[in-house]
């Protein structure tokens, strides 16, 4: 009686195989890199918090980057150009460290690149170097 429980009908397997072929053909015909869908995430072992150090550091760096952006945008007294430059350089350091942490966690160059471009564009928009429209245009240029 248990033999019939685990069997999948052949018609259902054929339908799934056809769906997979359709998706693969669509991806190839539209120059979509299917490798983007299979980014490996390193699982952590139970009871070993050092395995997720990259993830924790990435979150801390992103929070510090956002704090630096908020400091630049919302500080009431006008800041000198030297202070603004220093804060921007600190933001670049945090963006770099967050990108390294993302690469350590995901082990994928494409994911790291997307993350790095996103964090840098957030920093540039926050610092007033780019407007949001210019940032979107720059990202579009990088994608081509």
Image (cartoon, rainbow, N blue to C red):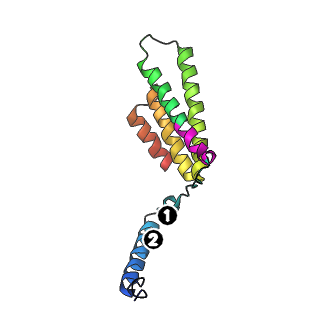
Q: Is residue 97 magenta?
A: no
> CB under 8 Å between callouts 2 and 1?
yes
What residue is pinned by disc 1?
34
User: Which residue is nearer to you in this view: 115 or 5?
Assistant: 5
Residue at position x 55%, y 16% from top?
A: 83
Classed neighbour count for the residue bearing mark 1: other residues with Cα under 10 Å, few (<14), some (14–19), many (≥20): few
What kind of element bears circle 2?
Answer: helix
Classed neighbour count for the residue bearing mark 2: other residues with Cα under 10 Å, few (<14), some (14–19), many (≥20): few
Residue 23 placement: quadrant: bottom left
What residue is pinned by disc 2?
24
Is residue 47 rendered to the left or right of residue 20? right
Is residue 56 rendered to the left or right of residue 1? right
Measure the alpha-carbon separation of dots 2 and 1: 8 Å
Location of residue 15 in the rendering, given as x and y in whole percent from the top left corner: 37, 80
Q: Which region is colored magenta? A: 49-59
Residue 65, compared with residue 113, is above or below; it is above
Residue 6, compared with residue 108, is above or below; it is below
């Amino acid at each position: 009686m248990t033999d019939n429980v685990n069997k999948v009908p052949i018609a259902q397997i054929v339908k799934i195989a056809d769906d997979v072929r359709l998706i693969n053909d669509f991806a190839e015909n539209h120059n979509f890199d299917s490798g983007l869908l299979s980014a490996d995430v390193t699982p952590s072992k139970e009871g070993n918090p050092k395995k997720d150090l990259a993830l924790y550091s990435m979150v801390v760096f992103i929070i510090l980057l956002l704090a630096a952006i908020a400091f630049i945008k919302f500080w009431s007294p006008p800041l000198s150009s030297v202070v603004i430059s220093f804060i921007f350089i600190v933001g670049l350091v945090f963006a770099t460290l967050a990108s390294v942490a993302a690469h350590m966690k995901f082990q994928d160059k494409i994911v790291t690149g997307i993350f790095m471009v996103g964090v840098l564009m957030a920093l540039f928009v926050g610092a007033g170097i780019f407007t949001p429209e210019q940032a979107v245009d720059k990202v579009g240029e990088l994608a081509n």
